[in-house]
Image: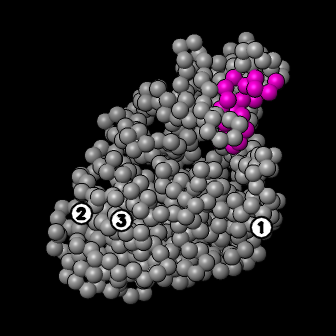
Amino acid sequence: MMAADTPTSSHPPTAAWWTSAVVYQIYPRSFQDSNGDGVGDLRGVLRRIDYLAELGVDVVWFSPMYRSPQDDNGYDISDYQDVDPLFGTIDDLDEVVDALHARGIKVVMDLVVNHTSDEHPWFVESRSSIDSPKRDWYWWRPARAGFAPGEPGAEPTNWESFFSGSTWELDPATGEYFLHLFSRKQPDLNWENPQVREAVYAMMRWWLDRGIDGFRMDVINLISKTVGSDGALPDGAVTRGLFGDAAPFTMNGPRLHEFLQEMHREVFHGRRDGLLLVGETPGATVEDGALLTDPSRAELDMVFTFEHMGLDHGPGGRFDRRPLDLRDLKATLARWQHGLEDAGWNSLYWDNHDQPRIVSRFGDADAHRRDSATCLATLLHLHRGTPYVYQGEELGMTNAHFTALSSYRDIESLNFATSARELGLLDEQQLVDALAFGSRDNARTPMQWDATAHAGFTTGQPWLEVNPNHDQVNAAAERADEASVFHHYRRLIALRHDDPVVRYGDFRMLLPDDPAVYAFTRSFEGVSLLVACNVSGEEREVTVEALTDDAELVLGNLARVASIDGRRLTLRPWEAVVLRLRNDR
C-alpha cells in the first residue's frame, strides 16, 4: 500500500518565468488551413492568434514546419533552416512569431536532432560512398559477421524500431546498413562526431537569432548510444516477437549529459534568460529527470516523462488497452513531484500529437465528456510544474473512433497494422479497435472550430478526416458557453498566473489508496489549497483530514459547491474542487 506523502519543499528552483507559464502546442498540419488545400498552415495560425490570447496561454510550441518529405508528418527533416511550402514561407513564420510576441506569447520550436530525413543533404552525402567525409555523421555498419548483406539476420543488431521492424536499413549501393530508431526514412545522426554536434548548434543559434524563445527537443535522450570500445553495438534482449529491445543501448546513453551541457555552452550561454528548454525523454526515470532539470547542471528546464502515459497500456504497448488504476496514476505523478522537488521542475501534460485524447482514455467521452474533461484538467494543472495544453484539449476533443483502417495516415499505426497482419496477431476488427484506442491520429484530426463542414478547418478536403462529433464539440460552441471546457481551461490558466500556491506550493498526496478520488494539497507561505477530484462516474464520499471548517471554494468544475460536512467531502461524478484552507494544518 502506498503511504500518504510528506510535503515537498516549497521553494521554486529559480525565479524563472516559466514557473507561472502555460504552454499551448500547435500541430500545424491540423490547426487551421488558409488556402483550401486541406492542410493547416502558417497563414491559418495568424487567423487564430486572438483565440490563443483569449485562452490566456504564455507560450506556443509548434510541431515541425521545416522542409520535409513528410514521411512522419514533418519529424523527418530535410532542411532545418527553411519552412516546408506545405505550411508557407519563412516570412510567414516570422510574421506569426511577431504577432505572437505582440500579444506577449513566446514561441518554442520543435528541435528534431536525433535523426534527419534520408533526403537531408547531410545523409545524401553520407550514403554516397563509404569514403564520404560525412559517412560518420550517421550510424553505418556492415552486415553481421558470417552473413551477406541483405540476408535474413544480417542486420548489425537485432534491435526493433519504434515504428515496427528492424532499426537497420540496407543501402545496396555501399553494402552497409544505416541505423534508424524510427522510420527507415529517418536515419539517426551520430552525435559521437563533433562535426555533427557543431552543425546542430549552429542551426540552433540561427533560430535564436531569428527571435524564437526556445526548443522542445524531440527524443533528446536518444542522442547518446552505448558503444563498445571497438565501436560495436550489442544485441538487445528478445522478450516478444522477432526483435530485441534497443532501449538499454539507445536511451539515456553515457554521454547524454555531456552533450546537453556542451549544447548549453555553445548555444545558450549569454542569452539564457527568457528561453524555455524542454526535452522529450522516453524511458527516463525520475532520477534521470532530476539530473536533466537541475539548474546547476545547465542542461534542460523540464522534461516530458512517459510513465503516466503507459498506465493504460498492456504488454503490447500503445495498441494494447487495459483499464487505468487510479492508484497507479497517483503513485507515478507523486513520485515525479517528489523527485524534482528540490532542484528540478516538472512538465505537466495529458495530450500531445503522439497521445490519444485524454478524455477518451482516462475520462468518459460519452456520458460525461464535459465533466470528465474539466475534472482531469483540474487534476493536472494544480500539480507543481508547467502545464502543456494540446490544441483541442481545451475544447474536450475526443478520439476519432475511425471504423476503417483506410481512415488512418499515421506511419506508426500503419506499420503496426501491417506487422500485426503478417504475424497473425489480430483480425481486422481487432486491428480497428486497437487503432481506435491507441493511434496517434486520434490527436491529429483537424481542430474543431465550428459546426460547419470540415469543422471550419478548411474549405477543401482535409488531409485527415474530421471527427464526426465536431457539430457538438467545437470552439464556437465552447466559447459561447461560460460553463464549457474552454472557459474552465481559461480559469485554470488564470489561477496559475495569479496564485503563488499553484506555482510554487509543496505537494502532498492524500488518500493514496482510494480507487476513485485523487486528492492532494499544495502549500506555500502558510496558505494551503486542497484539490479533490472524483475520477469516476459514481458519487463518492471521502474523509479528508486536511479539510477545515472555513474552507473556501477557489474553483470547481460543476455548477454548485461540493458537499462538505466537517471533514466529509461528497463529490458527484467527475466533480473537481479546489478549496483554500485558511487555517493551515
Query: What's the amino acid at mark 1?
Result: Thr
Label 1 and label 2: CA atoms lie apart by 47 Å
Image quarter (top left, top right, bottom left or bottom right) of the C terminus: bottom left
Amino acid residing under circle 2: Ser
Describe residue 287's horizontal placement relative to residue 204 as left or right: left
- Quick check: 558 above or below 439? below
Q: Dot 3 surroundings within 10 Å: few (below 14), some, or many (20 or more)?
A: some
- Residue beneath disc 2: 523
Residue 441 picture location, percent across and down = 69, 58
Instruction: Compare residues 238 and 161 and report the one nearer the observer.
Output: 238
* Residue 407 visible to the viewer: no
The residue beneath circle 3 is: 513
Stretch in magenta: 150-169
Does residue 210 belong to the magenta stretch? Answer: no
* 3D distance between C-alphas at marks 3 and 1: 37 Å
Quarter of the view holding residue 30 = bottom right
Query: Where is mark 1, residue-wise?
Result: 403
Q: Residue 88's spot in the image, x, y percent?
A: 71, 51
Q: Position of residue 232 (x, y in %)?
A: 60, 18
> Helix, strand or loop at disc 1?
loop
Secondary structure under badge 2? strand
Counting other residues with Cα less than 10 Å from the Cα at mark 2, is it few (<14), some (14-19), or many (20 or more)? many
